[in-house]
Each structure stands twice: as C-alpha cells, then as structure tokens.
Amino acid sequence: MTGRFANIIVDISHEKVDRPFQYRIPDALMGELAVGMAVMIPFGLGNKRIRGYVMEITDRVDYDESKLKSVDSIVKDGISAQGDSIRLAWWIRENYGSTMIAALKTVLPVKKKIRQVVRKTIVCKVDADAASQKAEEFAAKHQRAKARLMRELAAQPALPQSLITGKLNVTSQTIQALEKAGLIEVQTEDVYRNIYKSALPEKLFSPSKGGWQKKQLSENQGRIVDSIAADFRAGVRRTYLIHGVTGSGKTEVYMELIERIIAEGRQAVMLIPEIALTYQTLVRFYQRFGDRVSVMNSRLSAGERSDQYERAARGDIDIMIGPRSALFAPFERLGLVIMDEEHEGSYKSESMPRYHAREVAGELCRMKDASLVLGSATPSIETYYRAKKGEIGLFVLKERLAGGQLPKVYVEDLRSELKSGNRSIFSRRLRALIEDRLNKGEQTMLFINRRGYAGFVSCRSCGHVMKCPHCDVSLSEHTDRQRGVSRLVCHYCGYEMPGVTRCPKCGSKYILGFRAGTQQIEELLGREFPAARVLRMDADTTKGKDSYEQILSQFADGEADILVGTQMIVKGHDFARVTLVGVLAADLSLHAGDYRAGERTFQLLTQAAGRAGRSALAGEVVIQTYQPEHYAVVHAASQDYEGFYEEEISYRDLMAYPPAAHMMAVLVLSEDALTGAERARALADQAKRHAADRHPVLIGPTEALIGRISDVYRYVFYVKHRDYQVLTGIKDVLEQTIRDRQWNADSVQFDFDPMNHY
C-alpha cells in the first residue's frame, strides 16, 4: 500500500473515535508504513509527541497540504492487539464497503467513561501488640470508633473497607485520621466485573469440588482433535469444518481443542450464534476451565463490556465466548477461533459494514497465525462447497454421542387435515403425541417461525390492511392478555397504535389478525391442555437482561411441560427430557422470496428435529406443512444433508447464485423518492460501464421490497459475477463516485452475498 499521506487515529480508546488526523509521510518512511502500525506524531499546539495508529494510507489530501505535519517515526514492535484491530478494520472496509470509522467502531469497542469498580482494603501498619495498645489508648479518650477498628486489626491485620464502614460502623473520616497518624494504610485494587460468577454455583469454579469430570472422547472425536492439534503443532494453519449430526458431541471436541491450544500458550474465541445460547455454553466451559473464561454480548452493561475487554487485553482470560462481536476480543496470543452453528444468519451483520463473521474470522486467523474451526449439523452451502472443493478440511460425526438414535420424523400434510375437518393448528398426530408426553411426564417443544399474536391485521369486508404510516409494511398485532388490550406495532421503526375493532376505511367490524404466532399458540395450549405448564420464548418474552437464562433454566429444571417459541428455541439447546418436537408452520420460511429460502427451511427443520431424543429416551418429530413434497422438507425429514446439498447447489449453479457465483447488493437511501431513484440509476449505469468487458449480470435498479422505512425511500440493484474481485472493484468505483458527487457516504450501502433480500 503506497501513498503520500497517512490518516492516523490518535486515541482509539476514546468514545468519540470519529476523526482521524492527516499527516505527511516523510521520504525516509515512504513505502515503510502499513495500516495498523503504531507511529509517533507531533500533536497539538506545542507539537507534543504522542503515539497514534495508521488507519489509512492515501494520495488524497483532505486538508490544506501546507499545514500538514509529518510522521516522526515508526514505533518498534508497534503492531499490537490494537494495531491488528485497525488492520482488520481496513480489511473489512475494503472487502465489504463502508467508511473506515464504521469499520473501526465494529472491531474496537468504543470506551465510554465508565466508573471503575475499586476494592479497598485497610491494612494495619503496626504489629498486633502495638495495635492493641493503641486501641486501649483510644478507648481511654472515648474515641470508640478508633478503638473498635484497632482491636479488629490487632486480630486481623487486613480487612475490607466495606466491612469496616458497614458492620463496624467506622466512618471514612476516622479511617483518614488513622491513616494520617501512620497506623493504617488504605490499599486499592481495580476489580473487573466477572459477569456470570455470582449467578453460577461456586463448585463450577473449582473442578476439585465436584463441578466437572472430563468426558472420554469417542474414537471419531479423538481423531478429529488429534488431527487438528497435530497440524497446529506442525505450524499448519487452515480452516476446518466439523459436520456432525445433532447430539454428536461437537462441543466436547471444541473444548478438548481449546485445552490443547491453551497448553500451547495461546488463547481461543468460541463464537455462538445467539445470545440465548451463551448461558448454557458458559456453564459447560466454566465447568471445564474455571474463571479463565468470559463472555461478550450486547446485553452486557457498558461497564461489564468494558471490563471484559480489559480482562482480555490484560491476559486475565484464555477463552472468550459470545456472538460475532466476541471475535474482536483483544487477544495478543490468539491461536484458535471456533464458530459453532456456522450456518446461522446472525453471523452476518445487518448494519454497515455488512461483514460475515466467518470470513472475518478467517482473515483474523491469518493475521494472528491461528486456526479456524467451523461446526454445524447443517453447514451453510458456502462452507460445504469449499469443503467439497478441498479448500478447507472436512470431518464428519455421524453418530449421536449418547448412542441414541436420531428421532423418528412424521410429515403431516395440513391440506389433508383441513379436508378431513380438522381446523385446529395442531394436526391429529401432534395433538395425540403431546397428550402422550404429558401423561409420561416428558417434555415437548413447539416451534413456529413467527412472533407476537398475529402477522398482520386486515378487514375481511374491504381488504384494507393496517399499515405503518412511516414504512411500507403492515402492522403486527400484539395482545396483553392480563390487561385485555391489544396494540399494533411496526417491527421496523417501532411505531405503535392501539388495536382496532372496526375498519378505519369502511367501518366493518370484521377486522382481525392473520396467521398464528407464539402468543396464540400459548393460548390454544391453555385451552386444549389446561393441566399443561407452558413457557413461551420469543422476542417479546426475552427483552430483559436475564430473561433467556430464566426461561431456559425453568424448562431445564422441569418447571414446564411445553416450551413454545420462535427459532431461538431450536438452536443448540440440549434438554434430556424433550422427546417431542412439533414444527407448526414449516412453510413460512419457504415463502421468503429469496434464493436461500430452501436452505433456511432445511436448516430450521433439521435443527428443530435435533432437539428431540438427545438422551436415552427416544424422540419423535412432527413437521406440519402445506408442501410435504418440497425438496427441503423431504430431505429434512430423512435427515439427509448430502442429498439436500446436491439438489440445492445444482440450482445455485444454474442461476449463478452464491457460492457458485457472487452477488453484491447496492442499497440507495434518500429522504426524497425522485433523488433516490436517480442516484440508483446513476450508480447502476456506472457499474455497468466499469465492468463491461467482464460481463457482470445486473438486476435493477428498482424500488426495494420495503420501499420506505422511517420516511426514508429505498432503491436497490444487484450485480452478479463469479469473480468476487470484480465486485469489489465495482464497489471501489462506486465509492469514488459517491465521494466525487459529495453524497452522504451513509446514503449508499453495500452487501456482498447478502443473507436477506432488499
């Protein structure tokens, strides 16, 4: 990377990390500087020399060149964890399109001014006899507080200040007086919040107290661990895929690999797709590794996040667990990244920059000389495609660890149910099996890919649909059963209004919601199985900080017979007494209208089926569908990933969709509809002209599927090509066009191989 100027961040830990400073690169350093390097630069009116980090090297001058100062020198050994983070941010910015500041804020947790927790200890500076003597002297002078404290310190020479000011009722003024007299010393220590320790049983933190016993790996598990560990010791760094059926013991493989890596003096990141899985995973890791484990996720307070970042930077922990943000833990000695359930869409960021954690993890491992392990029962088509081509190592676990069989799967055709007179949302088979589990004292999970009470509200008389006044989407109905009121909510901008009983257009009273949601299922269960204890888990019941853990713990402890939920309940959870899983609306994800619909449906159904029969008890699964002949449903019912992959990849190749080809979505945002449409056309024409000799496929521009959100108009076009670099080249040209025309950089967004349509 060459250029005459360097854009430098001078304090990357500050909460207002939104302004780089530009410096001239002197001839002596020309060609030597690289993104991420630490440099010494003159700063401020007095030209004080401070440390900064190079975030970009360019020939573009952003300020008056005559006023630019020059970089002093490169700091020796200046590539640190922070420097690596900046280099990674640059890679994200180049490969996914965004401003450098947005990329920096992605990889660097912006520090806010958080009050540090401090532990104070009062230490006696004289021996026990002298302390006792002083206590008597104070008592004679009726200085009772001083006497009390010195007597306690004579018996125990160091005491927490909280104990002294609390139980001993000694004021801070008394402590200051004794400190001034030279009798005591107040020692302070920064305390980092260990966010889960207080909530977990003490025995988890000490394996010797019976909290954990190492499990014997199966022959197949051991072979995987030995192979990857041998590669690591031999200096081989690559990406591996562990394709293991649900319940095959992938987590045990992960933990053994991490133990081997830690023994090599390195650190590990364990990525999990959902915050809901954090608690269950963390308990297992604490049992194995004690409090050298921590977690990062968006539900932590600002102070908790800051503390976990500091603990990682100080080397106080060896393992970081969490969703995709945990990938950016500032580990100096990173040796391994494990990405469980790698197929999950939550690994793809839906805000700028729209990076995918799988690709970013690969680049991070390359930078850190680390290995990357991907795991899934239903790998993404992209990952399995690379494995079949030999680009990544492939390991397969075909048997369940406990020796149990995969569940028996029934596919119930809801069209036939309706013809035979069954208008219930529960098929006859599913209803009978729920009754059977209740009688046996076993548990059931019911999965529906909806949230709330209903999908949308419309009038049966005139067809009017209740829509958000700020977005081109229908409002969803949510009902508070205790209060007996309903409200209509926009899931895009948050707009709310009271529920309606009459159509605002024609006045008809026949206005109500379509499609069942988790709340309605909960109500139906209450009517049909009044003795059943039911828990609901969806976006509405998990808003609280600890709500995930509370619901999952209740169900795991047998405090409920049935757990109803959205897709968050079917991912990775392991409940020994769950022997029945019902999929109530298998078709909904088939109608998403994008090329990944079949893949998503297969993954959801297979993962849902995998929750049943994970112990010695046999499991059964009921898939209710209006399309039992769809290839995604057929292969999920037979648990045939290979068959599904072969059929799916043939469609992708035929239509030039990822991973057979690559696709870039360009989303144009504008508060004025005409301006947005014109800009989208201009950028699409520019893309076509730039790569005319490479013959890209251009679709659009057109109004986005949701044409307006929060009064901002949205236009989109897609560019497809089999060479990813052709698309990044087009992206670079479009970014230059945006700069030349002085458009707001945030008004155009890029998404490579998008997970969702626009």
Image (cartoon, rainbow, N blue to C red):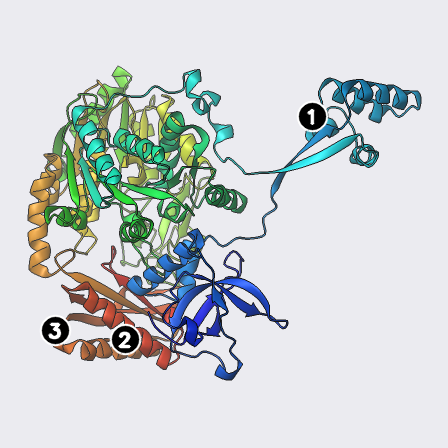
Q: Is mark 1 on a helix, strand or loop?
A: strand
Q: Are marks 2 and 3 in contact (CB under 8 Å)?
A: no
Say which amino acid is labelled 1: Ala
**Distance Cα–Cα, label 3 vs label 1:** 77 Å
Q: Do the residues labelled 2 and 1 touch (CB within 8 Å)?
A: no
Looking at the rendered image, the quarter that the N terminus falls into is bottom left
Q: Residues within 10 Å of mark 2 (few under 14, many from 20)?
A: some
Residue corresponding to mark 3: 695
Q: What element carries label 2?
A: helix
Residue 548 visible here: yes
Looking at the rendered image, the quarter that the C terminus falls into is bottom left
- Say above or below: 610 vs 680: above
Quarter-wise, where is residue 139 in the image? top right
Q: Residues within 10 Å of mark 3 (few under 14, many from 20)?
A: few
Position of residue 445 measured from the top left corner of the image (x, y, whole percent): 27, 30
Which of the pair 560/756 is nearer the observer? 756
Q: Residues within 10 Å of mark 1 (few under 14, many from 20)?
A: some
Residue corresponding to mark 1: 158
Residue corresponding to mark 2: 733
Q: Which of marks 3 and 1 is nearer the N terminus?
A: 1
**Distance Cα–Cα, label 2 vs label 3:** 16 Å
Say which amino acid is labelled 3: His
- Say above or below: 160 vs 140: below
